[in-house]
Image (tube, rainbow, N blue to C red):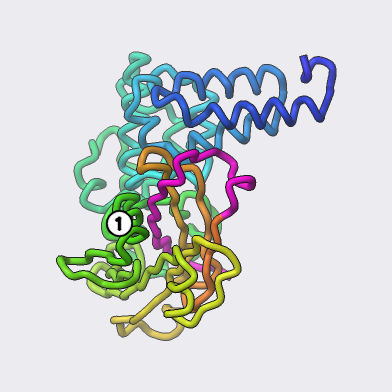
Amino acid sequence: MASDWHVTELQNEAANVFQLFLPEDPTFLSQSSFWQYAVHKGDQALQEVCLRYLAWNCEPLILSPAWTSLPFDLVRTLLSRSDLVLRNETVVFQGVEKWAAARGNTTIPENLLKLIRFPMIPVEDLYKLDVAQYSTSKLQGFQFNALPFSMLVSDLTEHQNIYESRIYFGRPWSFLFSSQEVRTYKQSDKYILQGQNINSLTSDFLTPVHNSAFFAFQNMRWIARVFIKTEDCTRESVTCSSLPAVGLKIQEKQNNLPSDLEERIRYRNKLIVRCEGRYVFHVGEFIDADSDSLLFLPSSAEEIYPCHSNLFSYQVVVRPHYSTD
């Protein structure tokens, strides 16, 4: 009714009500229905509320029974986004293959195939793909993994989206502070890391300098921190304007890259916040991989989707990319 009568204030309130209910259905049937309703009514704000939730919870969506019944337009729209949260691009490929098979197709339709980011598929998974069906896409993926930046510049510039990482949390590209670990730390001031008790939610981890196999043996070390209490900020001598806050920065570069190439590799790192480890309700972006700047979580009033229990897990995700600037 609000859409039919163009009552903007009531439309916005309806979107607010819908986003409260989005996390309540683990089958994803309601979320798909909400999106279709929003499209029917031409409600762009509600469409984005639904799409963002589906993108942030894309892997559970792909694994759900609702996935194969999603309409084509919804699948296509999701594949065009870079904020899909999942282990890796192989999950996308396998999901679209399953969606197509449910419609009697032996291969993925071309207009969906071109939206799969084959250069982002791990090289060992690329090797297993059927050569006859996806030879061109497979070649594009292997070229990205085998060639240096100087030979890829034109393709990177012309087909920028295909070479952009989504939010891949598969190993080794992320580190997770689970909701159980966070809760234990709140209660005891102890965080168990590799069998050792430490007095802060802090850990370091290794990743390659880039997700191309060309750099598979050139690593860098990151340090991730979660600040829950004022004492955490005081101990690290940082200013926390609000809590909780999360930090992620480069701790050590273990590579001998030429300086001109090193300048071409940059990072758009992300933070995934899950409610009770069940669904993603917030995604943030770190500003600078080299600085101590913190990422502050929104207040409950500012959250797009609710987490009534306030039991959060925090997963930092390293997202390298080539810069063509």
Q: Is residue 143 visible?
A: no
In which quadrant of the rendered view does residue 146 lie?
Answer: bottom left
| Image location of residue 121, percent across then percent down | 32, 49
| Quadrant of the snapshot with the N terminus | top right
- Classify mark 1: residues with Cα within 10 Å, few (<14), some (14-19) or many (20+): some
Q: Is residue 225 left or right of residue 293?
A: left
Front-lying residue, 118 or 50:
50
Extent of the magenta region = 298-325
> Which residue: 28% across, 66% down?
190
Is 9 contained in the magenta span? no
| Image location of residue 206, percent across then percent down | 27, 70
Tag 1, which secondary structure? helix
In which quadrant of the rendered view does residue 225 lie?
Answer: bottom left
Q: Is residue 24 above or below residue 176?
A: above
Residue position marked by numbered label 1 in the rendering:
184
Is 304 contained in the magenta span? yes
Q: Is residue 3 left or right of residue 25?
A: right
Query: Residue at the left extreme?
Result: 195
> Which residue: 47% across, 54% down?
164
Q: Is residue 254 above or below residue 57?
A: below
Front-lying residue, 119 or 143:
119
Q: Is residue 104 visible?
A: yes
User: What is the magenta segment's predominant secondary structure?
Assistant: loop
| Image location of residue 169, percent across then percent down | 35, 52
Q: Is residue 242 left or right of residue 103?
A: right
> Which residue: 64% across, 27% down?
17
> Which residue: 37% across, 28% down?
108
Amino acid type at circle 1 is Thr
| Quadrant of the snapshot with the C terminus | bottom right
